[in-house]
Image (cartoon, rainbow, N blue to C red):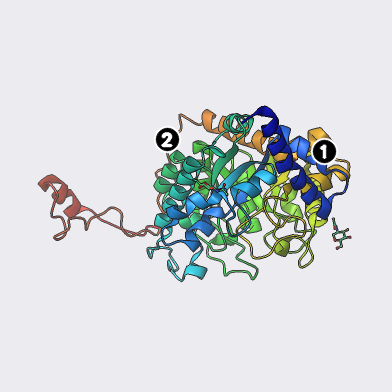
Amino acid sequence: MHFATLLLTLFTGLTPLVRCIGDAYDNGFLDQAIKLMEESPLLDTHIDLPQIIRSLNRRPLDALPQLNGSYPGHVDIPRMREGRLGGAFWTVWAPCYDVTGEDPGADFNTPTNHLRDSLEMLDIIQNMIALHSDDLQYARTSTEIMTAFSSGKIASLIGMEGTHLLGNSLGALRIFAQLGVRYLTLTHTCHSAFASSVGSGTPLNDVHEGNGLSELGKELVKELNRVGIMVDLSHTTPETMRQAIALSEAPVVWTHAGARALWDHPRNVPDDVLDMIGDGPGQKDAVIQSVFFPLFIAGEGSNVSHVADHIEYIANKIGRNRVGIASDYDGMYATVEGLEDASKYPNLVAELLSRGWTTEEMRGVLGGNLMRIMDKVDEVSESLKERLPSSAIWEKRKDLPSTNWGGGGPQMYWPPDVKDTVDKMQIRHDEL
Ligand SMILES: *[C@@H]1O[C@H](CO)[C@@H](O)[C@H](O)[C@H]1NC(C)=O
Ligand SMILES: *[C@@H]1O[C@H](CO)[C@@H](O)[C@H](O)[C@H]1NC(C)=O
């Protein structure tokens, strides 16, 4: 294409778009916001697009080519580009058993499809990134995010939402770490063998002592530190939060949450937990990425100002270097006015600029704060590389040691000395 034609195309392509956002919501700071976002990546730590792909298609991979055009929900490539998105954490998630009806039972031992579903979600994400390599680029570290961003791609990271997805197994967690999972939310809306959840509004009955982490959950936090996966406390009970903050050797994150003091929903972070975050004695570093879901923000009529209020409230408590942005796009049935889809991020950036946040502070909010936490999590992981993997298992498991293996009948494939040993074993399957 001739250069002048290219320019013309670019301008006719871009100008109406900027004006279009501006017409609806311009407070005079939109141009500055867009310029800033073109220099420093905005990282959204929670986008549920893979869920939509898997919900709409019998063969989910067949849907991937459509993402370069208009796609149902809040997110597709054209809208992410229009919204100047710098990076996204794509969510590996399948609904909790309260939704799917796959009850794992009181001891969490009844098998469910969650582990398969998680692997399929990861496969969708990997293939989405591969197919749209002009627009998306896989990243795991802050360096890889910046490499993707500087080559004009949307950095694509992987987050996993809920430990109900892990098959009660630290082994499964370690494999997900190898597959690139960068954060693990300690629960979704259900309790798991690892941790206690706040549910989806009404409190759940306690299953773990103190409504916090199980013994295996405590082991999980240490294992997450070791493998360099961020500990995400969104969706968890305040006691799970407090225990995880105290236990974690690395900083923690909330990948999508708000402030409880501003809007009293259990999904938001309470003040006494915010008090545990900081540089002071006994405090941990953290970043809280503010969510856009009206239910957690200000109810009906929530708008960009209300989201900015949550960010400012949290920043006033724990610092402007500890806040960030997380839409929850494609994972919510309602949206905030002015942040209706992935083309609207600049409205929030403009809102904060209009409140006097400096360019440097804004670079942090966009992604710098989160990348600081990611770097620290990586440093902690590096410092723990001599530590052996945890051998802990879910204490209520009844299948280990696996004395009924053998297909045609018990002990069928065992060499005689193994069989002798098994015959003499005092086997207890639920020690605790
Ligand atoms: C999306 O890409 C396909 C080719 O893979 C192309 O045919 C189609 O026109 C593109 N759609 C848009 C909206 O760019
Ligand atoms: C958001 O709504 C509040 C009223 O709840 C209003 O005062 C404020 O101006 C609105 N903000 C925007 C950006 O429209």
Q: Above or below — where is 31 with respect to 51? A: above
Relative to residue 117, is residue 416 drawn left or right?
Answer: left
Q: Position of residue 67 (x, y in %)?
A: 54, 50
- Crowding at dot 2, Cα within 10 Å, few <14 / some 14-19 / many 20+, comes out as few
- Choose between 184 and 405: the one closer to the eye: 184
Amino acid marked by disc 2 = Leu
Asked if one can make out residue 364 in the rendered structure from this viewpoint, the answer is no
Q: Quadrant of residue 115?
A: bottom left
In the image, what residue occupies the spot 71% across and 57% down?
A: 340
State the CA–CA distance, disc 1 to disc 2. Answer: 49 Å
Q: Above or below — where is 180 with respect to 95? A: above
Badge number at residue 32: 1
Image quarter (top left, top right, bottom left or bottom right) of the C terminus = bottom left
- Choose between 393 and 263: the one closer to the eye: 263
Callout 1 secondary element: helix
Badge number at residue 388: 2
Amino acid marked by disc 1 = Gln
Q: Quadrant of residue 292?
A: bottom right
Q: Position of residue 133 (x, y in %)?
A: 51, 38
